[in-house]
Image: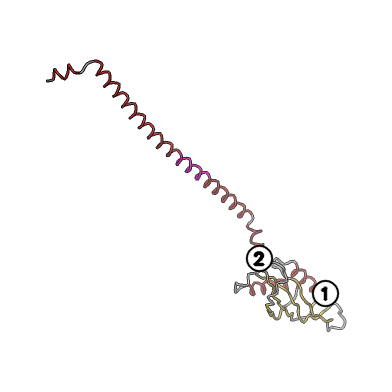
Amino acid sequence: MVEKQLKALTPPKLRIILIAMMVLLLVAGGGIFWYLRSQLVSFAHEVHEADIAAEESNANITQLQNLQRVLEKNEVAINRADRLVLDSSLATYQDTLINEITTFAEKSGLKVSSFSFNPSGDSSANVAGIKTTTVTVTLSDSASYREIMEFMHYIEYSLIRMRTDGLAMTSGSSGSDKSELNISSISLEVFIK
């Protein structure tokens, strides 16, 4: 029986079987190659997208680090800009104003006797979100023209944006010294947000 099967395998039949096996292996190899190639292309695409995301992230980090250095370098200017307009939502904005005006008065040789605040809510600053409030400052003693001018100079050039709204003064009561003035009140318009 084995002999019959061996005699049935003639060289042309073996050649056909060999060719069929080679074609089958070639088709199987091509299919496996195509599958692996598509997997490799998909993986390469994912790696490329991850690389682009990493480069963008690195660029963002570099940009943020540069901005941080700029902020640190300009910290003084930023703090000064923050003081230009007081934040009225903070309970301490009136205390800040009182301290600032009192300091200016002391530098000028004047004494402040009282403060009164009158929030006008007027938006005469023509800037969105900026309001004004009126602070009336009463001085306790008469003062010289030079002291008053020095005080007004400090007010006008203060970092906190304020301007003189009104000044009520009369000539001094000491008959011989005409440079003495009595100031009943100074009205200041202060910008707040």
In the rendered structure, does residue 52 fall within the stretch colored magenta?
yes
Instruction: Give coordinates of residue 88: x percent, y percent.
Output: 63, 72
| Residue at point 50%, 45% (across, down) | 53
Q: Nearer the viewer, mark 1 or mark 2?
A: 2
Extreme left residue here? 1
Quadrant in which residue 112 is drawn? bottom right
Label 1, residues with CA under 10 Å away: few <14, some 14-19, many ≥20: some
In the rendered structure, does residue 72 fall within the stretch colored magenta?
no
Q: Which residues are magenta?
A: 45-55
Q: Is residue 131 above or below residue 37?
A: below
Q: Is residue 32 above or below residue 90?
A: above
92 displayed left or right of 8? right
Q: Is residue 131 above or below residue 173?
A: above
In this figure, which residue is indicated by the disc labeled 1? 145
Query: Which quadrant is home to the C terminus?
Result: bottom right
Quadrant in which residue 103 is drawn? bottom right
Q: Is residue 101 above or below residue 175?
A: above
Query: Which quadrant is home to the N terminus?
Result: top left
In this figure, which residue is indicated by the disc labeled 2? 83
| Distance of label 1 from label 2 (alpha carbons) | 29 Å
Quadrant in which residue 85 is drawn? bottom right
Q: Residue 176 or 34: which is nearer the viewer?
A: 34
| Of pointers 1 and 2, the one earlier in the residue sequence | 2
Instruction: Give coordinates of residue 27: x percent, y percent.
Output: 34, 28
Label 2, residues with CA under 10 Å away: few <14, some 14-19, many ≥20: some
Instruction: Give coordinates of residue 71: x percent, y percent.
Output: 61, 55
Q: Main secondary structure of the magenta part?
A: helix
| Amino acid marked by disc 2 | Arg
